Structure formats: C-alpha cells, structure tokens
Image: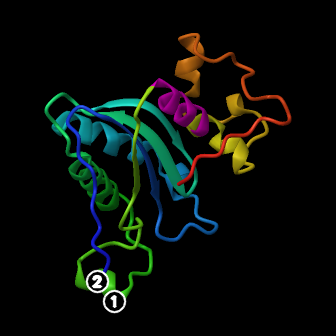
Amino acid sequence: MTNYRRLYIPGATWFFTVNLAKRKNNNLFIDQIDLLREAFHYVKKRKPYTINAVVIMPDHLHCVWTLPDGDANFSVRWGLLKAYFSRTIPQDENITISRKKRRERGIWQRRFWAHLLTDQEDFNNHLDYIHWNPVKHSCVKQVIEWPYSSFYRYVADGYYSANWGHSGNFSIEINE
C-alpha cells in the first residue's frame, strides 16, 4: 500500500482537482449544480476559506482556495463538501463492495489532487488553467460561454477581458 502524504501549510493557497468516480458520460456536477453550490456554502459556514477561482465541469472541478491564517486542513473541508453533496442527491449509482464496506457512495474519487501555489506566477498559471478548462474539454468554443466558472468575476474585476483566450492557438498545460 502506498504511503500517501499531504503537505499542510496554514494560510496557504492551493489548486485542487476533484473528480467523480465514474467520469465517462457523467454530467452530475452540472445536473446538480445548485446542490454543489449549496455544499460549498455549507462548508464555508463551518470551516471558512476563500474561493479564489473555480470551474465546475460535468465530471470534475478545479479550484483555488486560500485557507485562513493558522488553518491548514483543506482535507476536512473536502470531506465535508463531498459528504454534504453525497447526502443531498438521489441514491441511484452502483456501489462497489469496497465502497459498501466503507459506507461510501459511488460518487467521488477517493483522492483529489492538491498543489501548493508558491508564487504569483504559479497562481496566475493555475487561474488561467481553470478558466480555460471548458475550452480544453470542448464544452464551449470561448471561455466566456461557460457559465460554471469564476471567469465572469475576473472579467468584472478587470483581470481578464471578456474575449480572453479566443486566439485559436491558446492553451495551457498544468501537470495534474
């Protein structure tokens, strides 16, 4: 068994990728977007954090969070979010024996990707990656067309122009 370790730094800013267990042809996050938003708010009330950026895709999501000073536990936040969402949606998925033994639903991948953002360039690159993701996955042709993202907030704040990323050769690669 792999000895899986996470780095925990109080007040740090993190990039996350979180996936559904069964990603192929699965639109659960979009189909249940209101419940997913509710789950984020539920967790923020109990364990505050700042959502710097987010994109909700049909079968996965990316976000950047900053934790409060003195608090390093992003894992508990993800656990609360996954649990809340799982409890609020109808139970119609197939559940493996392994998940049944652990009393888990078959919704989420057990692990998630976490990357500590180390400087402004790292933050900016991940912000671009998040907002470009719907184009990368061919959900839309232009970033502005995807409604489940923080892109609009960044346009309103003047960080991006509304036509950002529209050149045909724009792409960003982040190792996930």
Q: Which residue corresponds to the image point at 58% horizontal and 53% vertical from the top-left?
A: 58
Tag 2 secondary structure? helix
- Mark 2 vs mark 1, CA separation in Å: 5 Å
Q: Which residue corresponds to the image point at 23% horizontal and 46% vertical from the top-left?
A: 8
Figure colour scheme:
rainbow
87 relative position to 96: left or right: left
Extent of the magenta region: 120-129
Q: Residue furthest bottom?
A: 97
74 relative position to 171: left or right: left
Q: Residue 121: x, y in percent? A: 52, 27
Q: Residues within 10 Å of mark 1 (few under 14, many from 20)?
A: few
Which amino acid, by three-letter code, is at mark 2? Answer: Lys
Q: Residue 113: x, y in percent? A: 42, 55
Q: Residues within 10 Å of mark 2 (few under 14, many from 20)?
A: few
Foreground residue, 145 or 134?
Answer: 134
Tag 1 secondary structure? helix
Label 2 close to label 1 by CB (< 8 Å): yes
In the image, which disc is placed on residue 75? none
Q: Residue 164: x, y in percent? A: 72, 23
Q: Quadrant of residue 104?
A: bottom left
Which amino acid, by three-letter code, is at mark 1? Answer: Ile
Foreground residue, 28 or 23?
Answer: 23
Q: Residue 86: x, y in percent? A: 33, 61
Q: Which residue is mark 2?
A: 100
Q: Which residue is mark 1?
A: 97
Magenta span: chief secondary structure: helix
